[in-house]
Image (tube, rainbow, N blue to C red):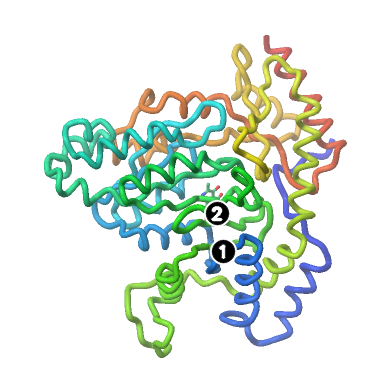
């Protein structure tokens, strides 16, 4: 039997023609397509500025620089995410302060964020609780309240699986402690929180366009902001530190080559023109899954919070409940040509984070529970109902036979 792909881009002759059109010119980078793509993206979201970059990860890195992250700066974020949302803090030698997530959505728990920000800003003994184990022992970081007050820089919530984090209380915490807020919206293009698009709430937000995303540019990302100072900084940082009036070999600051090329931008622009259709197709596939799995006792379908007025389906993630075993399901499905993935593996349990920060199992119980039971099923906008049928039929049988 044919195997079912885990994900796949939704491309038409319009995208192919758009890329070919750039191929006919000699301008493969820094040309009209990136500007057109950025304008179209900013218009879609209703934000002041959109800056194209060559990945979501590089976009996140730039936001951490703009947020003033430097050695030992603290950023509150979620351990239930793709690793780039924590790594971007480390690129600037900052320290991620993980707080656990809401068990229903898997998004960062705003009550814990408020508590962490409060304790860290006070800088007394209560602050130590939130620091990673290896940092807790570095007294120089925690005993000087003054340094801690100035070390807490930013909140970095993730809109996991395409569902917005609970932004209102997070914004309140950011305001109360004078922190910036950066949305990792890499999985959430088109999602809405209380009727407003995710990615329009923070000082900056980052989107990603890897081929499994709602829309793709191959590799690519977009940083959006309403702040003109951050917009200018992002444009300089992605372009080797050149300021807008700098000559080609003048570099005002330490920068990077994080530019998005014209071929990718042309592909992105063509996908933007189909974005409503792309999102609707994914919603339809998610609906097929929901219909077939909602009454299963050992399979929990995704929970959509009342604040999520529009879910943007990036992945379709179910929970496999005991006594069925998620890992057994992964292996059995794979043997039948049906891929599936544990999603996410908690960041604090990744080898590098255990080594550097001393994390262990037990540190973030909700995240770990979700990491143990969550299973991403094959998902894309081009999946057929027959494919969804086959995945669900096999999944149901495997889960129920295991009991
Ligand atoms: C939550 C989250 N953040 C960041 C990224 C990084 O994006 P990219 O792969 O474009 O670097 C991803 C990509 O999968 C993601 O899901």
Of residues 307 and 330, the one nearer the viewer is 307
Locate residue 309 relative to residue 231 in the image: left or right: right
Task: Give the secondary structure at mark 2.
Answer: loop
Which quadrant: the C terminus? top right
Residue at 66% x, 69% y: name it.
Answer: 40
Q: Position of residue 324 (x, y in %)?
A: 63, 15
Q: Position of residue 107 (x, y in %)?
A: 51, 36
As drawn, 388 above or below 179: above
Q: Please name which of the two marks, 2 or 1, marks the residue nearer to the observer.
A: 1
Of residues 402 and 357, the one nearer the viewer is 357
Locate residue 161 relative to residue 259 in the image: left or right: right
Judge the density around disc 1: few (<14), some (14-19), many (≥20) Cα neighbours within 10 Å.
Answer: some
Q: Residue furthest right?
A: 386
Residue at 66% x, 23% y: name it.
Answer: 300
For label 2, the residue is 199
Residue at 37% x, 47% y: name it.
Answer: 174
Indicate if the residue with disc 2 has its beta carbon within 8 Å of ligand 1: no
Dots 2, 1 in contact, CB < 8 A:
yes
Q: Position of residue 155 (x, y in %)?
A: 39, 47
Cα–Cα span, label 2 and label 1: 9 Å
Q: Position of residue 187 (x, y in %)?
A: 59, 48
Q: Quadrant of residue 120?
A: top left
Indicate if the residue with disc 1 has its beta carbon within 8 Å of ligand 1: no
Residue at 54% x, 55% y: name it.
Answer: 200
Locate residue 370 relative to residue 274 in the image: left or right: left
Which quadrant: the N terminus? top right
Judge the density around disc 2: few (<14), some (14-19), many (≥20) Cα neighbours within 10 Å.
Answer: many
Q: Residue furthest bottom?
A: 247
**Mark sitting earlier along the chain (2/1):** 1
Task: Give the secondary structure at mark 1.
Answer: loop
As drawn, 280 above or below 331: below
**Which numbered tag is attached to residue 47?**
1
């Amino acid at each position: 039997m044919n195997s079912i792909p885990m994900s796949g881009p939704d491309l038409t002759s319009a995208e192919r023609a758009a890329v070919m059109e750039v191929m006919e010119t000699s301008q493969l980078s820094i040309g009209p397509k990136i500007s057109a793509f950025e304008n179209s993206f900013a218009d879609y979201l209703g934000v002041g500025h959109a800056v194209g970059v060559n990945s979501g990860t590089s976009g996140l890195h730039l936001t951490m620089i703009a947020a003033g992250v430097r050695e030992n700066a603290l950023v509150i974020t979620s351990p239930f995410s793709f690793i780039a949302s924590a790594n971007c803090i480390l690129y600037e030698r900052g320290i991620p302060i993980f707080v656990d997530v809401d068990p229903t959505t898997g998004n960062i728990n705003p009550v814990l964020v408020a508590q962490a920000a409060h304790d860290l800003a006070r800088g007394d003994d209560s602050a130590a609780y939130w620091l990673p184990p290896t940092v807790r022992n570095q007294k120089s970081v925690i005993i000087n309240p003054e340094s801690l007050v100035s070390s807490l820089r930013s909140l970095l919530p993730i809109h996991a699986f395409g569902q917005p984090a609970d932004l209102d209380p997070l914004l309140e915490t950011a305001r109360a402690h004078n922190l910036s807020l950066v949305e990792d919206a890499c999985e959430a293009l088109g999602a809405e929180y209380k009727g407003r698009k995710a990615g329009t709430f923070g000082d900056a937000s980052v989107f990603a366009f890897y081929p499994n995303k709602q829309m793709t540019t191959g590799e690519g990302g977009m940083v959006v902001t309403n702040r003109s100072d951050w917009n200018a900084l992002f444009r300089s940082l992605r372009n080797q530190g050149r300021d807008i009036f700098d000559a080609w070999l003048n570099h005002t600051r330490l920068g990077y080559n994080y530019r998005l090329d014209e071929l990718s931008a042309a592909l992105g622009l063509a996908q933007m023109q189909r974005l409503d259709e792309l999102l609707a197709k994914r919603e339809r596939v998610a609906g097929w899954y929901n219909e077939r799995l909602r009454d299963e006792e050992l399979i929990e379908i995704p929970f959509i919070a009342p604040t999520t007025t529009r879910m943007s389906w990036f992945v379709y993630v179910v929970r496999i409940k005991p006594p069925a075993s998620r890992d057994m399901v992964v292996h059995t499905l794979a043997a039948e040509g049906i891929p599936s993935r544990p999603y996410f593996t908690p960041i604090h349990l990744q080898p590098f984070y255990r080594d550097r920060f001393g994390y262990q199992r037990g540190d973030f119980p909700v995240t770990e529970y979700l990491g143990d039971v969550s299973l991403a099923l094959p998902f894309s906008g081009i999946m057929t109902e027959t494919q969804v049928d086959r995945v669900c039929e096999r999944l149901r049988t495997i889960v129920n036979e295991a009991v």
